[in-house]
Amino acid sequence: STMWFVLSIFLVTSFGFVDCRQEDQSNHDCRSCRDLILEDLANCPGNGFKCDESEPLSAAVLTPSDPCTCQSLRCARKGWRLAVNGTIVDKVWCKGGQWLSSGFPAASFVCAKGPPCPAVPQTSTAKGYFASELIRSTEDGTIVYSCEAGWSLISVEGSVVGNLGEATISCKPQSGIFELAGAPAKPKKFTCGLVPDCTECDGKVDGFWSQMNEKYTPSDTNPNKPPTCEYTCPSGTNLIFEGMRFNSVICQMGSLAVTLDSFTGPKLADPNKFQCDTCACGEAGLNDGGKLGQGLCPKDRRCTKPTLATPCTATCPADSTPLYKDLAGMPLKTTITCTPDNKWIGADVDTTLGITCLLSPGKGECDGPCVVSKRCSDLTPFACDTKTHCDETLLVYVPFGEGYQVMCRKGSLVTDSSPVGEEHILTCPASGIWTMSGVSQATCVTDDSQVAVCLFTMTETLGEVDYECAYGTCSLTCKDPTKQFAYVTGNGPQRNTNLQCLENRPWALNEDYIADTSTIKCVPI
């Protein structure tokens, strides 16, 4: 349809133009334009735009007292703009007696209202980049999609990936068209991308070093986790910050934020420093809970020595848990780690009896020699004399650190290199050489001969003592359950319900030496 629009114009002579702009003086026909056609069909942009020939217009007010103002037209209502030949313009104005739009003659126009800005098509993947969603914001009424600092705008069209750097995508609601670098954005998908590279993080984290460490390559991107570079201290050292131990330093690509253990962990900021301290807990505090563990292992259970996995950590084998005694003398279980002050478990616990691994009931035995990097020479059955009852089927193999031990499920160990009662455990360390020189045969003694020498030294308790030998320990108790042992050590008079036979002598469970074994008696509890 076509509608004629006629402006009523006050004709003003050229006299008295002394106060007008030079443009008005040279183009005094800028107030003489007349009819302009309102036409939908020839001017509406389409692409979702709504056009209406009946929309009110706003024109410059021309008065004789203001001879300098040129004629101009624009759409009156908010959200509506003039469209000329399918192009959105702010206004048309008069010059040289004719209406112009963007410097070209305009024969007709219409008021148009753009559609709402559609959502930018996005993708969650871009080959060679970590991908993240675009950030939507509004600036002076214009919708803008951009990326956070350090990230680049990435376009994806099929297999073609383009890096647009710091470019943004914008859309003015009145046009409804997204623009990229001032031109309409082509139908591509977009994302924010970051090249998986730790170079910038290397420089950032180096600013916190007091000692270099090993570096790990970044892992794959996670929608809920920003891409990061991870740094850890060298093997055998602890990562320490403000007296606390951490596992790693995390640097986020892009933002270069540096934190501890995770991207939400404690933040490192200059002048905060961390260091990689060498662990010095050592293997001395790790034992099998028996002789060296001074009775740490419960009487009816089996224990084995923890393995020193790294200078900072020790581990227990499968089907076992760490065991030590705290200040109150009660067994506790926890992870075996070396603290920043170089103490196993923690400075507030007592590990003077050492740390052992408590095996679950019925667990921890190997079918024959345990599978280790180096096995000791195989053992053959030891032939006992006819007066001694022996049973080689009671021999068991138990993991021990990086090696294994041989002991008796019941009874006491005897070998071709040690008499009965002398040694209860035979050890094969990581070297693959038996700790007992020249040993090649072993069996288990199950009669009284295994404790005969030990009991003989206890002259005041003959006939009053029971014994039980199993898994490398020979435990002694008074037969009368209402009595306990009384004895004297270097620490003075002592009492206990149990003693143990070690090297054919009675010992206190805490390995205190009983100098005069003839003073051991069974006394009322």
Image (cartoon, rainbow, N blue to C red):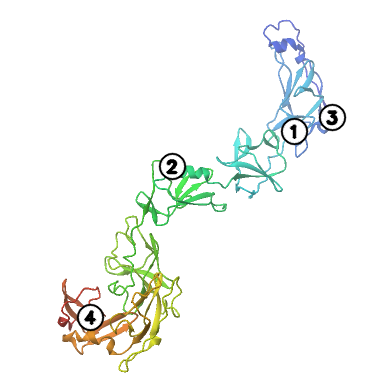
Query: Residue 94 placed where, x, y %?
Result: 76, 18
- Dot 1 falls on a residue whose secondary structure is strand
Q: Name which of mark 2 and mark 4 comes first in the sequence.
A: 2
Q: Is disc 1 surrounded by few (<14), some (14 to 19) or many (20+) residues within 10 Å?
A: many
Query: Residue 480 placed where, x, y %?
Result: 22, 87
Q: Which mark is residue 207?
A: 2
Q: Is disc 4 surrounded by few (<14), some (14 to 19) or many (20+) residues within 10 Å?
A: some
| Residue ID at (83%, 31%) | 42
Mark 1 or 4, closer to the camera: 4
Q: Name which of mark 1 and mark 2 comes first in the sequence.
A: 1
Q: Where 170 sits versus 33, above or below? A: below
- Dot 3 falls on a residue whose secondary structure is strand
Mark 1 or 3, closer to the camera: 1
Cα separation, mark 1 vs mark 4, equals 108 Å
Q: Quadrant of residue 272?
A: top left
Cα separation, mark 2 vs mark 3, equals 72 Å
Disc 2 + disc 4, Cβ < 8 Å = no
Q: Where 306 sits versus 472, above or below? A: above
Cα separation, mark 2 vs mark 4, equals 62 Å
Report the side of 228 relative to 52 (left or right). left
Please name the amino acid that badge 2 sits on.
Gly
Please name the amino acid that badge 4 sits on.
Arg
Which quarter of the figure is the C terminus placed in?
Answer: bottom left
Q: Find disc 3 in the rendering and name its residue.
A: 2
Q: Is disc 2 surrounded by few (<14), some (14 to 19) or many (20+) residues within 10 Å?
A: some
Q: Name which of mark 1 and mark 4 comes first in the sequence.
A: 1
Q: Which mark is residue 505?
A: 4
Disc 1 + disc 3, Cβ < 8 Å = no
Count the labels in the image: 4
Report the side of 495 relative to 235 (left or right). left
Choose between 388 and 267: the one closer to the eye. Answer: 388
Q: Find disc 1 in the rendering and name its residue.
A: 112
